[in-house]
Image (cartoon, helix red, strand yellow):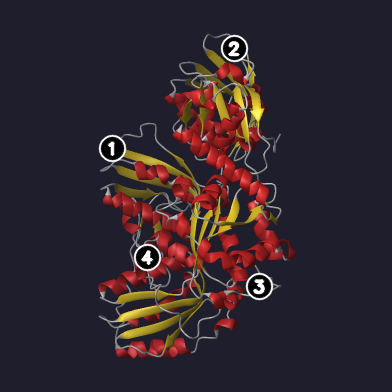
Amino acid sequence: MHNAKLTIQQNTINEPYAQLFTLIGNIDSDSQPALRNLYTLPSNTTTELNFSQVNSMNSIGLAELLKLIEHLQKNNITVRITSANQTIGLMFNQTGLTHLLNQDCPNASTAQPTTPNATAMLQLVFPQDRQASSQCIQLIGNIDASAAETFLPLYQIAKQRHIELDFSNVERINSMGLAQLLQLFEHWQKQQISIQVSHLNRMISVLFKMTGLTRFISDAAATNSTTLATTAQTPAFTPTSTADKVPHYVIQTPTLPPLHTAHHLALAAHAAQSAQPAHQLTQEHGLQIKTVHQTEPNTHHFELIGIIDATALPCLQSLWAVPPYTTAQLNFAQVLRVNSMGLAQLLKLFEYWQEQHIQIQIINTNRMIGILFKMTGLTRFLANNIEAAPTAPTPQHRAQTAAPTTGYSAPQHTLTPPIAALNSEKLNVWINAQRSQHIQAWQFFSTYLQQHLGRTFNLELIHGTATEHPKAIETMDIVYTNPFVAAQLQLTHHFQPCQRPLNQFEEVTVLIRADDTRQTLEDFQHSTCATTSANTTVYLQGRVILEEHPCNANTLNYVLTGHDIKALQLLLKGKADILFMLSQTYQSLSSLSKKSLRILGQSDTQCAYPMFLTAPQSMHLNTALHDVLLNMGLNSQGRQALAELGFSGWSKPSHEECAQLTQLYTRFNAHKTS
């Protein structure tokens, strides 16, 4: 029972317009498929959820349950929860949902709350009244790169509101997550939204202090807490209680001395020149700064070597000695990684430099640091048009040095000769991650390609609405995208197919309700068909299946929902008659959902798949990219990159397959003009 996956059983109940469901197992991160079945319940009814056989519920499971309850209440469904144990009762109490608990649930005021999973993806818990002028939003999980998609609803909050973010269930914020927070706060300030954060743990409060965000920390308990004196090297704070989770802090921002005398600059230069060569550095060496010979008047050049983290503060303090009204150029060619604490130190330094009217130039950042700077709004300091310093390592050397940051060790085999001699400029690469959970895996994959191609990338890594003003895809050198866009690029921009992942096909399943009395597709003329988008091969293949029967696809009214589950809800609620669904999504539905559906047709073309393509101006890359992808299984780094994406390998698309895909796309264009 302890490790049981959640299942939901429907029971009979002697009450009109009411349904009873017994939840069996644990409610956790794996519960979404089971809970999804309850999203299709009819409106204006009562739903009772019996928790007698629920053993435990963690923070992620609670977040999923809260989303379900919010959805049910929007559809005028009365929710009752019965037979919840004491711990779960307490979780409902802390979430403000005790009004849903039946009288048989015990008073859980003395139970201990569940600790959030250390690896949990971020979830948001909104108040019931999301239009109120003052709202408290609870954050549950860890704030990292994946938080970009979770934060999207926060950008929709109306102007001139007061928003409190409750961090009591946030364990950790990494550098990418900090960048997301900074971007959100900047947007909110432009919208005149008052920001308050509360219940930070020790590490996050230190991070806020070092990043200059202490002005947002709630001071409701200021009168009951003692203000601590702090130093520049050791951030400190006074909690209002002895618990590790502290409700509120009063934190003093450290004031660093404005060291800009010639004496201090000389000391800094002397200390930095004793730095070790880059090839001798390991993660344990931290940050070193080397002063480069000054070739331009009033410009100070510094090479940063190693890792910028919490231990980098003493080293970075030497940079506070740069004189006002000059230029400081930081060469990041030998910087392996910047974490959240290191980013906080850099932000404080840059803020001070700007106060001193010091112009900032940053050159030769690696891909991950470049993304971090972009997300933090620091791209204005990047000088991409400046050539690398003569001592900058080659791409191969940088790949070997940077291996610890991505989880890869140095490559053991040279799979293809570097092609950098053909063109020293960065390659413009577009990758459509398809699934948000694969964003980080594709970042690792991109690093692998850069190492083995011997070229650096200007990467456009996109996924749905998480994309921030991407460049035009037709201007790219290399593209990895879905089959619909792949066909479009081949026909309209003459892109060349290179490789496709094995066994990754897009097929369509045509569905109707199980209780629909119509038996064949011929019976569905002039009906309503729900699907996610017209710009997918699922839509194209669904129309082809309809046209293979007397049912003319052009007679149907198409409703485009943008999401599979929304399309499924339309079908089950009777607002649509037919559903085009990605076959992979249909297979992942629970048995309860499948019982409500009936299959009328399925495709098996095996011609619609995502693929890598090269642009006409970059055809010379095709062979090298082809070789690198095909040989990924020959070394451990390549196998790891494939495994994180769920791929087994690569294959070259056949001429017949590509022709079939482009014919499908052309047929769609004919439909649009008919």
- Kindly identify the amino acid type of the residue bearing the numbered disc 4: Leu
Residue 276, numbered circle: none
Disc 1 to disc 4, C-alpha distance: 32 Å
Characterize the local packing of mark 2: few (<14), some (14-19) or many (20 or more) Cα atoms within 10 angstroms.
few
Point out the tag, 1 or 2, that comes first from the N-terminus: 2
Name which residue type carries label 3.
Ala
Give the CA separation, mark 4 to mark 2: 60 Å
Mark 4, residue position: 378
Vertical order, 498 against 127 (above or below) = below
Q: Nearer the viewer, mark 4 or mark 2?
A: 4
Residue 197: give x, y in percent of width and height. Answer: 37, 50
Disc 3: CA contacts within 10 A as few (<14), some (14-19) or many (>=20): some
The residue indicated by pointer 1 is 133
Task: Please state which of residues 328 and 512 is positioned toward the viewer in this rendering.
Answer: 512
Q: CA distance from mark 4 to mark 3?
A: 30 Å
The residue closer to the viewer here, 466 or 309, is 466
Does residue 550 sit above or below 373 in this rendering?
A: above
User: Is residue 656 depicted above or below 72 in this figure?
Assistant: below
> Which of the marked residues, 1 or 4, is nearer the chain's N terminus?
1
Residue under circle 3?
410
Local SS, label 1: loop
Say which amino acid is labelled 1.
Answer: Ser
Rounded to the nearest angstrom, the CA distance separating label 2 from label 3 is: 63 Å
Amino acid on which the number 2 mark rests in the picture: Ile
Give the quarter of the image for residue 111. top right
Marks 4 & 3, CB-CB < 8 Å contact: no
Q: CA distance from mark 1 to mark 2?
A: 41 Å
Closest to the observer, 595 or 1: 595
3 vs 1, front mark: 3
The dot on residue 13 is 2
Q: Quadrant of the N terminus?
A: top right
Q: Position of residue 552 (x, y in %)?
A: 55, 24
